[in-house]
Amino acid sequence: RSTCKKWNTLSKSSFFAKKHLAQVAKVAEEAKEFMVVVMMNYSLYLMGVNLSDKDVESCSIKRQSKLICPEIEVSKVFHCDGLLLCVSKDHKRLVVWNPYCG
């Protein structure tokens, strides 16, 4: 990892992860917002989806960030136990990606 020892230890702490994820889930639930991974044009993106109770016009979808390095064009994505297995467009490479760690 390219972090200092304190951040590395903190990121591996299950207490920190549970506390952080619970807080994010609570805020997202209150805001009626959730995150999804979307594949477009052979790339993966993290999207924020906000579904408002008020009306359809107040709903929104925002691209948060592009995932995985730009040199890889992804043609297929499989999900298992929180990991994503990405198959390249040319079918010559596989990428295992952990969205939590980036």
Image (spheres, rainbow, N blue to C red):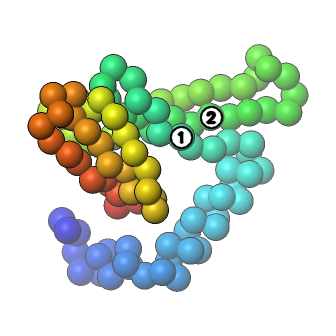
- Report the quarter where the C terminus lies: bottom left
Q: Which residue is mark 1?
A: 36
Which of the two residues, 46 or 23, is positioned nearer the viewer here? 46
Q: Quadrant of residue 49?
A: top right
Labels 1 & 2 near each other (Cβ < 8 A): yes
Q: Which residue is mark 2?
A: 49
Type of the residue with mark 2? Val
Whichever of callouts 1 and 2 sits on the residue coming sooner in the sequence is: 1
Alpha-carbon distance for marks 1 and 2?
7 Å
When the figure is inspected, residue 43 is found, relative to residue 18, above or below; the finding is above
Residue in the picture at 41% in, 30% down: 39
Image location (x, y in percent) of residue 78: 39, 45
Type of the residue with mark 1? Val
Please give the label number shown on residue 6. Answer: none
Residue in the picture at 37% in, 40% down: 77
Residue 70 appears in the rendering: no
Which of the two residues, 70 or 4, is positioned nearer the viewer here? 70
Image location (x, y in percent) of residue 20: 55, 68
